[in-house]
Amino acid sequence: MVPLRGRLLPRQGAKRGLQTGPSPVDRGQAGSKHHLITDGHGTPLAVVLTGGNRNDVTQLMPLLDAIPPVRGRRGRPRRKPDALLADRGYDHDRYRERIRARRILPVVARRGTPHGSGLGRYRWVAERTFAWLPAPACALGTRG
């Protein structure tokens, strides 16, 4: 115990161990996030890189706008998907309405609901695409 201003306080412990580092949950630190949209096979259609302190949902509409025309069958190339699958970071009612206005079905997990919605069966495609990114791109920061 150490006396301080008339009280006895516990003695301060050791500063830091060898295996400690900065807090991984500190949102105030500099960093970056990759926002990625893929097709059903994992082919990246559009990538946006933002600061680590930006909210994920703010990049939803720029990602949809960045999708290039996809060639395939005869006729006009497709510019929009039939459905959009996303995780809880992209859940916001205003953006759901904007997606529906583009005639895209939003399949986004709701915040505050228990996990197990089944989106993980399809989300691994996007996670695999993150793993395909070259090492220097992944070293820039976290992915989102």
Image: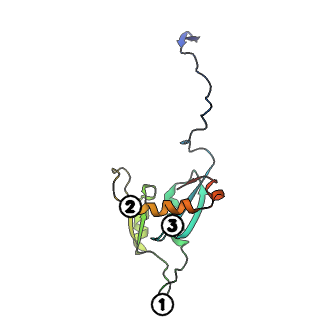
Q: Secondary structure at mark 2?
A: helix
Name the foreground residue: 113 vs 4. Answer: 113
Q: Amino acid at mark 3?
A: Ile
Where residue 13 is drawn, which disc sits there?
Answer: none
Where residue 75 is drawn, which disc sits there?
Answer: 1
Quote the CA–CA distance across marks 3 and 1.
24 Å
Q: Position of residue 8 (x, y in %)?
A: 53, 11
Q: Is residue 2 above or below residue 57?
A: above
| Residue 53 placement, left or right of 114 | right
Q: Position of residue 52 (x, y in %)?
A: 58, 52
Task: Please give the residue where the numbered disc 3 appears in the rendered image.
Answer: 37
Name the foreground residue: 79 vs 98. Answer: 79
Q: Residue at x 51, y 67 (%)?
A: 37
Q: Residue at x 56, y 62 (%)?
A: 132
Q: Residue at x 55, y 9 (%)?
A: 6
Quote the CA–CA distance across marks 2 and 3.
16 Å
Q: Amino acid at mark 1?
A: Gly
Q: Is residue 23 above or below residue 48?
A: above
Rendered image quadrant of residue 46: bottom right
Q: Residue at x 41, y 73 (%)?
A: 101
Number of marks drawn: 3
Q: Quadrant of the N terminus?
A: top right
Q: Amino acid at mark 2?
A: Arg
Q: Position of residue 40 (x, y in %)?
A: 44, 70
Q: Secondary structure at mark 1?
A: loop
Q: Between disc 2 and disc 3, whose residue precedes?
A: 3
Q: Between disc 1 and disc 2, whose residue precedes?
A: 1
| Residue 19 placement, left or right of 123 | right
Task: Please give the residue where the numbered disc 2 appears in the rendered image.
Answer: 121
